[in-house]
Amino acid sequence: MMTKRYSETALRALVEFFGNPMYVAQEGRVRVANEAYLAMLGLGREQVEGRFFLDFVRPEDRARFEVRYRQREQGTLKETDPQRYLLPRVGGGLLEVATHVQEVELEESGRALLINLLVLGERPAELEVAERLVETSAELVAARSEDAVRRVALAGLSAAGLSARFLMRDGERFIDRDGAPPPGEGELGLRALSEGRPVFGSVQGLSTPVYLPLGTTLSEVLWVSGPGLSPSYGSVLALFAKVVGAALTDARLLADVERGRWEMVAVAEAARFVAQPEPPSAEDFLSRLASLLGAEAVLLYAPESPEGELVLTAQVGLDGALKNVLAAQQGGLSPAVMAARGAVLSNEAEERALLEATGGRLGCGVAIRLSHGGHPRGFLQVLRPPGRPFVGADLRLLGTLSELLMTLLDQRRLRSESARQLSDTRLLLDLARTTTATLEVASILDVASDFLVKLLDVSNCFILLHDEHAGVLRGAAASVTHRDFFRSVVIPVDDPVSIAARVARERRPVAIPDLSKVAELETRELVRRFEEKALLGLPLTSREELIGVVLLDDTRRPRAFTPAFVELAEATCGQIALAIANARLYESLWASYAELAAARAEMVKRERLAALGELSAIVAHEVRNPLGVIFNAVASLRRMLKPDGDAAMLLDILAEESDRLNRMVGDLLDYTRPREPMLQHEDVPRVLQDAVDAAQAQQGGSSRISLSAEVEPDLPRVPLDRRLIRQALVNVLVNSIQAMPQGGVVQVRARREAHGSRDVLRIDVADQGCGIPTELVHRVFEPFFTTKAQGTGLGLAVVKRIIEEHHGEMTLESAPGRGTTFTFRLPLTQPTSLP
């Protein structure tokens, strides 16, 4: 039996015939909908047809319906019973409907689904709200803090379509916990608290407010507002408010238990600080103290030296601006007052001063004097925001903790001194190991600069080496943060102001405890760049020879360099100077060995070339005579027989192979023949163009390959052998052309370049060919190495030799599949040959 096929017009007439809501869905979109379906949704036809049908179901039902729809489209869902679900209405509320689905065929677009809906009734809004609040109540069980309870409760009410706020009682009015303006009708909240039941307010716009007591406190209510709220919601909302109140009570009890446990742990840990193998820092102690007392900030004031003034030595909870303010004002409390009173809670005047100094952030404080052996050692101050005053119990607890803090500080001081001595010993040992394990000057200097910073507790270390020929000190090493920049520093030894130059001339230490008091030094570029406050210069000498200068600075504060400090620094610099001298001696010896090895290699190379040349001459003589006979015989046969077909092909092969053998003999003679380039100043653009023209002519001028030459303007004439350089360029260009059987562009570029310590002519020959495999790049200049079926393997070897005979160098870069670039570098200046 064939299924009836409907046109869209017929299908629309069919669904409009029925009074119950119906629509046709195809590929997930509403194709046709009747007026009953549009009326049920409360939307116009243009707002429904063409949109996805899932847009008109509840978000939580979309995933389920999408799976069922796909199964029906694929024919895997055989279910025929009607399905029930809730449909949201535009004006609010939910409709419970039953659906029956039937397949239909459309003439234009094939199979579709006809959905017939039966409206079962409107679901009560109270039931929907109740379900949402039950789900939220279950989530409240997992909330571990008051903030979490409030956040979950507000989110649940919002999901139920209601707005809500927690209001705190303030006398006869209420204030919002989040700082937002409170709603009106505060007397209704008071009434809800006193009667212990929900109190509904008057309708405001479309919404009705209700005040809900939380049941466990008389200082807070939950304000809820939403459209259509009525006393019928009262029992549901009242029950939810009690659940929220119980959750808040549980969260407070849990917080109290956790706080009690935390206080016990904190006090116990504070008591064990002095006995720990590695006690925590003062900041760690202050952080725990702040947590214990619920403080915003904790400050420790102590003198930097036994007779020094009190300064802020440690703090937690302050940003940069507040730290500077309280460091200068010492927390608003006078040290003299602290010495007289011992322990004190801030009075009104001090709280006003603190509020003004911190911009209203801090307003309550408690401070206690720190003493050791009956002598004042500073004071500790704990600060809170306004409205959270300290009480006597806080002061007593702080007194106990301050005694432990003093013990901790003494323990850390002793450990710091011991660790410093141990660190110095290890650093000296590390320096000795490094200077004996390496003979590279750069490595020794980098290690030495870092070593001196750690050993002597300075901010930066700079090392300059003496260049006797130029009469300057050159930056060679520095602390990590300035290492790259300092290597470019050059200071003349005769500079009358420079501390480094003065140390080099006098060969003795020079110390400047306070650079701000030396006007000519304070304005120096390096002093301003590094923000130096104190500076010490030491000479590096070995056997009365000046090796360099070491500069040590302190960017934190002016510093007096004691004789013991200078003596330790001099001893360390002596060891560094000796290591540098040994490394230079080794480098000199190594250079001599390298030169000797290079000379021996060159001698062996020349001897091999001479032997190969002699052998090549013999081979060329013995091979070229028969080749001449072969050439003559081939020419005579062609003239006498006038061959065609296979005979002509065989004669062509004989001629080509004879010619290739002749070229191979010629390349061999070119490679082995000793020659001296005839260097004359030549016009580079002309030489390049001649080579390009010759390469094009040699390859038949293929239209698929383009050769171009680009020369830097104002390039001077360069001393070179025109014939040899032309031969080298042609060889490379021919290779590039042969590497591009499919065509492409070969570019020849020439420009001036600074290479090493001299200016050179750089010539690049770049192609777009197949490239050279990475594993073969290192072999391309080897004699007799080739990857071509017709190659001799001598072309690039001859090119490299020509470039080296010009005292130049040749390199290549190649990427398989993207091309190869050969680079020649020839000296711009060298003696020319006699004519």
Image (cartoon, rainbow, N blue to C red):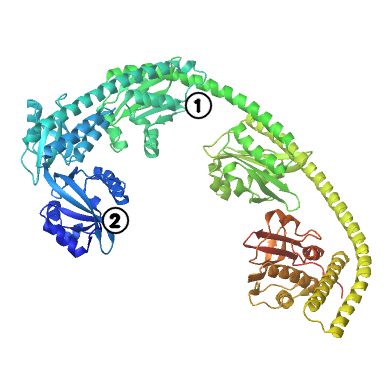
Quarter containing the C terminus: bottom right
Q: Is residue 183 visible?
A: no
Tag on residue 27? 2
| Secondary structure type for disc 1 | loop
What residue is at 56 percent from the left and 35 percent from the top? 559
Q: Is residue 671 visible?
A: yes
From the viewer's perspective, tell me whether residue 648 is left or right of residue 420: right
Tag on residue 305? 1
Where residue 491 sits: x, y (%)?
66, 50
Three-letter code, disc 2: Glu
Quarter containing the N terminus: bottom left
Of mark 1 and mark 2, the one earlier in the sequence is: 2
Does residue 99 lie above or below 301 as drawn? below
Which residue in the rendered view is the most extreme toward the front? 1
From the viewer's perspective, tell me whether residue 127 is left or right of residue 320: left
From the viewer's perspective, tell me whether residue 15 is left or right of residue 253: left
Where residue 634 sits: x, y (%)?
86, 78
Does residue 723 lie above or below 239 as drawn? below
Three-letter code, disc 1: Ser
